Image (spheres, rainbow, N blue to C red):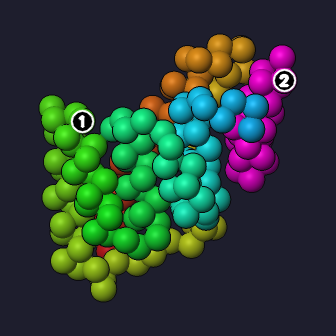
């Protein structure tokens, strides 16, 4: 029951734009079930959104190597400005999902960004968009397994588009 309440609180906080509050609720879930990779991925996503990409990398370290995990690692490294590490993470994700053309596209975009590295503007934390996580509806209803899977998957897809939006601002 504690997990359901914490998940519902995370969803309420997130829906109202309280990202730090949502992270605090996700932290409770992570403490209750530290071995759950879905919770760890969601926690890492919120850590990135709240400006703690190094902590996100630490949270992702013990998780199995999935494409979603490597994409979150890539976003954390991107936030830190480590474009070489971003490329390595994207390559690892592409190895795990060789038929995913979007990963090849991201690699090409990254190579273009690296060649223009001095020209890229960086966003402040106040400019980061709040992303919609439809999996929270599943969490609200108590379907933790599918809710965490949906949120985790959705975070990876949204992070894919954030890099493209940053390129458009150049």
Return the x and y of residue 157 as percentages of the image width and height. 40, 39
Q: Is residue 125 magenta?
A: no
Residue at horizontal 53%, vertical 40%? 41
Residue at horizontal 28%, vertical 69%? 84
Which of disc 2 and disc 1 is earlier in sequence?
A: 2
Residue 96 tag number: 1
Q: Quadrant of the N terminus?
A: top right
Residue at horizontal 61%, vertical 64%? 51
Does residue 30 sit above or below 53 in this rendering?
above
Residue at horizontal 54%, vertical 62%? 53
The part of the chain drawn in magenta is 1-30
SS label for mark 2: helix
Residue 153 left/right relative to 8: left
- Name the main secondary structure of what is drawn in magenta: helix
Residue 112, located in which quarter of the rendered image?
Answer: bottom left
SS label for mark 1: helix
Residue 107 left/right relative to 86: left
Q: Nearer the viewer, residue 121 or 146?
A: 146
Crowding at dot 2, Cα within 10 Å, few <14 / some 14-19 / many 20+, comes out as few
Residue 12 in view here: no
Residue 92 in view here: yes
Does residue 142 sit above or below 133 in this rendering?
above
Q: Could you give the CA–CA distance between mark 1 and mark 2, rounded to whole angstroms?
A: 35 Å
- Which residue occupies the extreme bottom position in the image? 118
Q: Is residue 12 magenta?
A: yes
Q: Quadrant of the C terminus?
A: bottom left
In the picture of the structure, the residue carrying the numbered disc 2 is: 2
Residue 71 tag number: none
Does residue 18 sit above or below 134 in this rendering?
below
Return the x and y of residue 109 as percentages of the image width and height. 21, 60
């Amino acid at each position: 029951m504690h997990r359901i309440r914490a998940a519902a609180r995370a969803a309420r906080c997130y829906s109202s734009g309280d990202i730090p509050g949502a992270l605090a609720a996700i932290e409770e879930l992570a403490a209750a079930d530290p071995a759950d990779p879905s919770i760890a991925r969601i926690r890492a996503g919120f850590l990135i959104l709240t400006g703690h990409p190094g902590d996100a990398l630490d949270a992702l370290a013990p998780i199995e190597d999935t494409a979603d995990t490597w994409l979150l690692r890539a976003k954390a490294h991107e936030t830190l400005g480590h474009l070489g590490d971003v490329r390595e993470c994207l390559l690892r994700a592409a190895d795990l999902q060789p038929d995913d053309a979007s990963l090849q596209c991201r690699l090409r975009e990254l190579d273009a960004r690296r060649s223009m590295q001095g020209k890229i503007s960086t966003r402040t934390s106040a400019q980061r968009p709040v992303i919609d996580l439809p999996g929270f509806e599943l969490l609200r209803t108590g379907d933790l397994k599918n809710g965490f899977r949906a949120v985790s998957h959705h975070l990876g897809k949204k992070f894919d588009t954030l890099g493209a939006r940053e390129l458009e601002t150049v």
